[in-house]
Image: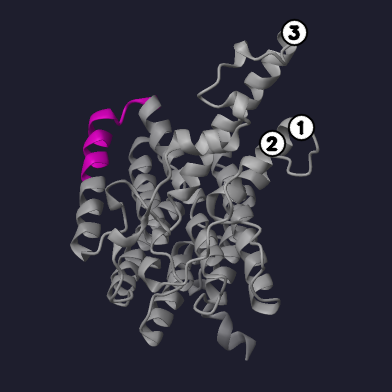
Amino acid sequence: MSSYFDKYVPYLPDKHTSINLFMTFTPLFSYGSTCYSIYKKQTSLGFSIDICATMFMASILRILYYVTSPYELTLLRQSCVMIGIQSLLLKISLRYRPINYDPELLINLPNFENELNGRLHRRLSSSHAIVEHERYKNVLDVLQDYAILALNYVVTALSLFVKLFDVYFKRPCLFWQWKEEKKYWKYLVYFTGVFSVLTLLLKDSVFYSNFIGILGLFIESLLPLPQILLLTRLQSVKNFKIILLLSWLGGDLTKISYLLFGTNNISIIFILAGLFQMSLDLIIAYQYIILKWYGPWKEPFLDSGDDLINNLILNNNSTSEIELDLLEKQPSPLTKSTSSLIIE
């Protein structure tokens, strides 16, 4: 019997080729199941189409990066497959989006100055000059408050950035929240065209090559963020497929293992981006476990953008006077939306 199979062994792919083939077609397994689930249930509720935008832009930039700085061919083929499956996923998601979806009903993004002043103690707000306050005894007191002010500038900026991924808020020009399907494809054509022309003109520029490479990795590393915020808003994983989460985590492990042990022609930037993306996927896994087996939390540990940034940067357990003032000035958590009008 063994001799019967031995004659076919030379025709089978070796271990390295098998791994490359698996890496190439991983997107088909990861997102193909999501396409089938949406089609079967006739609804894309619970799935963030921002994922499609993220993977489209990241894959296009990765392909163009290959023109300026060739890398492992397997990753190039994977990007091409990714664009194909994301095209199908976007088409199905838009087709089965709630019919009463209207982006004009979304909430406007908060004003930066108002958000900043809401976080600051009154003496640090824009209506009060720091250097004129009587409490300052020496230059260290002034520097301390300037440090607090600078920190809150960063926190506010990051908070507003995270809100761009939250389906509750209206983005500038309603980016990727359009009601008409043709606008999504039109944007992708423009995006591809602009960067393709730039790549042809600047393909010999090291700066441009590094720019599109890092930009593509940065966009892809933010892939799980829209889903994190969407699950926080919904307080439910009813329409979120566990197979998608498992495929993400499996893809993270496969990608990192491949980058570490499967190839030598790879930059450390790819590895760091993969680790960051995996950390966000682990947050989704934590959300899934809590919501699936313990139900909605009364006070969400990530209430949209604010709590995500505050938990990462601010030490909310501090008892100092200044930080207590910051906590008291923070706006109250937004009421969780239950209307399908603001859910993609």
Mark 1 → mark 2, Cα distance in angstroms:
6 Å
Magenta region's main secondary structure?
Answer: helix
Q: Which residue is mark 1?
A: 321
Report if residue 71 is visible in the image.
yes
Q: Which residues are magenta?
A: 193-206
What residue sits right under mark 3 in the picture?
Answer: 138
Please give the residue where the numbered disc 2 appears in the rendered image.
Answer: 325
Q: Secondary structure at mark 3?
A: loop
Give the Cα separation between the discs numbered 3 and 1: 18 Å
Name the side, left or right, on which 337 lies relative to 260. Answer: left
Q: Is residue 94 left or right of residue 146?
A: left
Residue 212 in the image, given as x and y percentages of width and height: 38, 37
Out of 49 and 235, give the one closest to the viewer. Answer: 235
Quadrant in which the N terminus is drawn: bottom right
Q: Is the C-beta separation of discs 1 and 2 under 8 Å? A: yes
Earlier in the chain: of badge 3 and badge 2, it is 3
Magenta stretch: residue 198 in it? yes
Residue 237 percent coordinates (x, y)? 56, 75
